[in-house]
Amino acid sequence: MPADRKATIRELKLLLQGADELAGEGLTAVLQRVADGAATLLRAHGASVMLADEDEVLRCAAASGSPGRRLGTAQERLGAGPAHDSFAQDAPVACRDVTTDKRWPDLRHLIDPAAVRAVLSAPLTLPHGGPIGVLDVFASRARDWDMAEIADTMVYAGVAASLIALALEARLRGVLLDRLLEALRAATDRPGPEDG
């Protein structure tokens, strides 16, 4: 992983731990709203957001409900699934029926097959950077995803990635402002030549 992407992921980790607030709420709450909004706007049964850690392991950061959380944590546990393929390829990955898909045969044992069947994963890619995570949307029945749904999901994932980028930028600016204020305080607390 490039050093700048590793630093970005480290900053994301701090944001997720609540080190900073976004308009009164932490990044975790914002990602929860991203997952909830994806399910509603994309007319899916549910959604989850997975973010990469410093070792590029995808971790479930938010989900619109327990089936989405199970899908995210199952992929996290297996290190395989549509989210992992989407992240690795930096491209959308569609699955008609995750319970019969031969690409991830063990995934079906860890999800709720009555709630999760068709899955569409789209990478969360920062502007001028690589993917930092994945947005999963799913349906409770086997189905194909049409090109419009794939395009809509990619657009939504792009908006979510931009929101994350803004949070990272705000954190960086806050850190720089804190450092400048510390330097200013240190400079003003020092006795000057006129103080003797």
Image: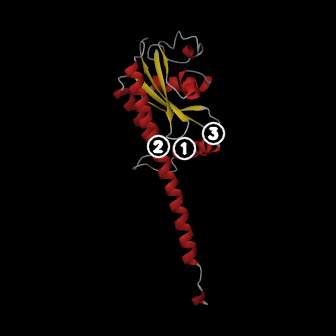
* Residue 12, numbered circle: 1
Nearer to us in this view, 36 or 161: 161
Residue 72 x %, y %: 52, 26
Give the residue pinned by disc 3.
54
Q: Residue at x 57, y 69 (%)?
A: 183
Residue 65 x %, y %: 43, 27
Q: Amino acid at mark 1?
A: Leu
Q: Quadrant of the N terminus?
A: top right
Categorize mark 2 by other alpha carbons within 10 Å: few (<14), some (14-19), many (20+): many
Classify 43 as above or below 26: above
Categorize mark 1 by other alpha carbons within 10 Å: few (<14), some (14-19), many (20+): many
What colouring does the structure picture have? secondary structure
Classify 26 as above or below 95: below
Q: Residue at x 57, y 23 (%)?
A: 85
The answer to whether residue 129 is left or right of residue 162 is right
| Disc 2/disc 3 C-alpha distance (Å) | 17 Å
Q: Amino acid at mark 2?
A: Leu
Residue 90, picture quadrant: top right
Q: Are marks 2 and 1 in contact (CB under 8 Å)?
A: yes
**SS at circle 2:** helix
How many numbered circles are shown? 3
Q: Earlier in the sequence, mark 2 or mark 1?
A: 1
Categorize mark 3 by other alpha carbons within 10 Å: few (<14), some (14-19), many (20+): some
Q: Nearer the viewer, mark 2 or mark 3?
A: 3
Q: Amino acid at mark 3?
A: Glu
Residue 82 x %, y %: 54, 21
Classify 9 as above or below 45: below
Q: Earlier in the sequence, mark 2 or mark 3?
A: 2
| Disc 1/disc 3 C-alpha distance (Å) | 10 Å
Q: Earlier in the sequence, mark 1 or mark 3?
A: 1
